Image (spheres, rainbow, N blue to C red):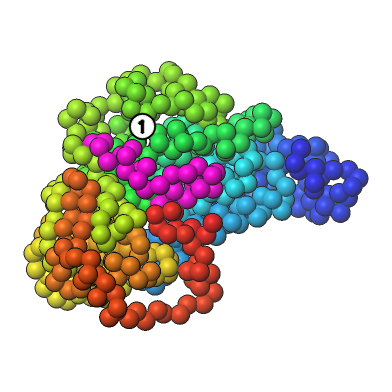
Amino acid sequence: MKSNLITKWPEKLASRAMLRAVGYKDQDFNKFQVGIASTWSNITPCNNHINTLSKSVEYSVNKFCKATIFNTITISDGISNGSICMKYSLISRDIISNSIEIVGNAQSFDGIIALGGCDKNIPGCIMGICRLNIPSIFIYTGTILPGKNRTDIVSAFEFLGKFYSNKITEKELFLLEKHFIIGSGSCSGMYTANSMALICEILGISLPNSSFQNAQSISKIINCLNTGKIIYNLIKENIKPSDIINKDSIIDSLKVVSLLGGSTNCYLHLLAISKCLNLNFTLKDFSKITNNLPTISDLKPSGKYFISDLINAGGIQKFLKYLIEINLIKGNNITITGYTLKENLKNIKINYKNKILKDLNFPIKKTNQIKILFGNISKNGCVSKISGKEGEIFVGKTLIFNSEEECVNHIYKKKIYKKTILVIKFEGPKGGPGMREMLTPTSALIGSGINKDVALITDGRFSGGSHGFVVGHICPEAYEMKEFAFIKNNDLLYIDTINNKINLLIDKNTFLIRKKKTIIKKKIFNGILKIYRENTLKSSKGAFIN
């Protein structure tokens, strides 16, 4: 056992004495040691119920092994969005990953079970267990139910836009604030957390039918209580994340989340996860996999329904089996159950069609909402999310902002003309630093009612809750003094999500002249932001410290 490094008698007498002080009994030293990585925090409703779930996992594991709960961090994307606080969001993914790796190795655990709720918890946990590469399980801690009048966090951002557009009063806004979000769980649409949870189930690192469950439900508790025997078997058979997560399972997961109109952040996270396992994917690879897929879900943010509605309509497993039956996904990868995804779905009857998931032959959109674009301002690629309601080609004049705050202030206070393309620079991994999400400006556009007439592009990211004609992850970013940095006001920009192109309509010589004349004042940052800026990979490679 790997854990002999801390439990072996008599060589590890001192270690054993320390462990007795935290409750170990004689028999515990002879069991497999399992670390339970909890992201519990009262910071956010996404995570404030996780203590209950981690205790359920501990109870289950202790029947077969010896469980030890430890904590890692979380931040709240919903709370930090729209301010400098958001610079720390993506970085928290790396801190979570590193902390799980550190504790897992320092305690010499035989296995890990990680629980996560908020957006960066999930990829952070997966990256951590991939780096450890010991038998592991990830537990998604569930989705929140809609608030009063079927609202959620995105509703709050969009209603703020309505307030600044004088469509509602301050008194009305204050009353709404009290009911937007009720209870515990991760944001309730096909946003980043639910998108990544679905990816984890398809990758095979989570239990079957665990990705779409309500946070405060008996199903989620049962999910946790089923982990003890599974982690014991994984350790006994030495089935590791590298045996489970492979190129085929990543391709399968990417296809499904794209069909459902999931979060653009998934592309960033899957690039990072694949690198942790030395699986070499590029944005071009991802574009070949997903660009020609349709969009079949009517889930929020661009649709009408919440994940809880899909749960009530029968969940996701029938749909997954259907995709395997028509050979759209393979499902041949081994999962934490010891069986393949296809075998896990053996007893599921195919009849997935409902008002939320449409027939593939009659999709909501014949092409995918998420497209990878390339062009003269993004030679390494960028990620767009276009529902189709705004059209698929946008040609307009640019309006330049050098930060998210500049853009938001303009949206709230000044008129924006039709066919304008808002350009937010210096929000990339290094330029931010931190690659903030642009949920506040996209929601401001929707709240003010002008989202169908404008587009927004950035080297930053978008929240899973963002929608409209939006393009993010532009790479190389402005901070690198490449083409994106040299866009000026009133330039003509052409965005074509049919042919997957994004081009500024100027010639190479104009780019060169502008480069010579452009001086960028680079803000100085200290602490973790400085470390991240100096060491992070590009967004086209996952934007993490490798």
Determine whether 352 is above or below 296 in the image.
Answer: above
User: What x and y, as percent, mark residue 460?
Assistant: 34, 63
User: What x and y, as percent, mark residue 265?
Assistant: 37, 52
> Residue at horizontal 46%, vertical 25%?
332
Label 1: which secondary element: loop
Front residue (pair 216, 271): 271
> Residue at horizontal 43%, vertical 44%?
281
Determine whether 230 is above or below 544 in the image.
Answer: above
Is residue 179 visible to us here?
no
Would you say the magenta stretch is mainly helix, strand or loop?
helix
> Residue at horizontal 37%, vertical 48%?
283
Instruction: Indicate yes or no whether the magenta region holds residue 284.
Output: yes
Label 1 sits on residue: 316
- Asked if residue 502 lies left or right of residue 482, the reply is left
> Residue at horizontal 57%, vertical 38%?
241
Circle 1 packing at 10 Å, graded few (<14), some (14-19), many (20+), is some
Front residue (pair 110, 429): 429
Determine whether 217 is above or below 488 in the image.
Answer: above
How many numbered dots are placed on residues in this image? 1
**Amino acid marked by disc 1:** Ile
- Asked if residue 284 lies left or right of residue 4, the reply is left
> Magenta span covers which residues?
268-294
Quarter holding residue 287: top left
User: What x and y, as percent, mark residue 139?
Assistant: 51, 42
Instruction: Give the residue furthest to the front.
Output: 509
Front residue (pair 289, 149): 289
